[in-house]
Image (cartoon, rainbow, N blue to C red):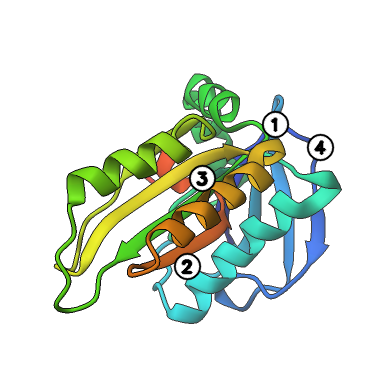
């Protein structure tokens, strides 16, 4: 029996395309409830195992949607959301409709960018001054930002930014200016990603 694996939810026109999808599927399509469209592929389990390949495919499908038709907005789901059938999925869309609509509103026309700043082994960095300088440059351009874990003692800053597509170039330039100014630090600037860090829609039990 085939189940539905969910990548994300949008209130845009339905899509259907062939691609390498999670769990060996080769087609992505939408299941609709009122104006909401869940982007799905078929899968033979409701508890998929997160392999590196499938995690990458999950992200690739989201990126493909975000790049379609000049840029679409999709609320991304974390890896592993799979439902018994269309009915179970539509029930969830019905229940979480207000939350999805709010989330779509928040991220409409925006994408997530990541910035990590890393120091060399034996350098001292005035973290407060650096954070203030980064905030001065970037916070006025970004719609929102959130801190991420400093998972290594060489990591002096790790943030995600939600940026309007129209502001992307300005944001890129601001990051480049900071990089010039702090040329003794390593900048890792990544994205665009689906805005995982800026949506928090819990969708219920998968049964």
Disc 4 or disc 3, which is closer to the eye?
Answer: 3
Q: CA distance from mark 4 to mark 1?
A: 7 Å
> Dot 2: what SS?
loop
> Where is mark 2, residue-wise?
45
> Where is mark 3, residue-wise?
195
> Dot 3: what SS?
loop
> Dot 1: what SS?
loop
The earlier-in-sequence mark between 4 and 2 is 4
**Residue 49 position within the rendered picture, expressed as x and y whole percent measured from the top left:** 39, 73
Q: Residue pushed farthest right?
A: 69
Establish if 70 lies above or below 156.
above
> Where is mark 1, residue-wise?
11
Q: Do the numbered discs 4 and 1 sit on residues whose CB atoms are within 8 Å?
A: no
Residue at position x 37%, y 60% in the image: 182
> Dot 4: what SS?
loop
The earlier-in-sequence mark between 1 and 2 is 1
Q: Residues within 10 Å of mark 2 (few under 14, many from 20)?
A: some
The earlier-in-sequence mark between 3 and 1 is 1
**Residue 4 position within the rendered picture, expressed as x and y whole percent measured from the top left:** 58, 56
> Where is mark 4, residue-wise?
13
**Residue 194 position within the rendered picture, expressed as x and y whole percent measured from the top left:** 56, 50
| Residue 7 visible at all | yes
Residue 150: which quarter of the image?
A: bottom left
Q: CA distance from mark 2 to mark 3?
A: 26 Å
Disc 3 or disc 1, which is closer to the eye?
Answer: 3
């Amino acid at each position: 029996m085939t189940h539905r694996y969910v990548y994300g939810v949008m209130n845009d026109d339905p899509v259907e395309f062939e691609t390498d999808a999670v769990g060996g599927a080769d087609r992505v399509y939408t299941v609709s409830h009122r104006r909401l469209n869940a982007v799905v592929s078929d899968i033979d389990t409701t508890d998929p195992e997160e392999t590196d390949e499938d995690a990458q495919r999950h992200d690739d499908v989201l990126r493909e949607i975000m790049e379609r038709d000049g840029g679409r907005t999709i609320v991304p789901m974390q890896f592993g959301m799979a439902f018994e059938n269309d009915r179970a999925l539509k029930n969830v869309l019905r229940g979480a409709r207000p939350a999805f609509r709010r989330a779509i509103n928040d991220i409409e026309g925006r994408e997530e960018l990541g910035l990590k700043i890393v120091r060399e082994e034996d350098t001292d960095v005035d973290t407060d001054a650096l954070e203030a300088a980064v905030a001065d440059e970037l916070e006025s351009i970004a719609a929102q930002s959130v801190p991420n874990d400093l998972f290594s003692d060489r990591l002096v800053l790790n943030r995600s930014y939600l940026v309007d597509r129209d502001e992307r170039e300005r944001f890129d330039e601001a990051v480049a200016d900071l990089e010039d100014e702090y040329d003794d630090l390593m900048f890792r600037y990544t994205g665009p990603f689906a805005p995982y860090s800026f949506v928090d829609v819990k969708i219920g039990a998968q049964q």
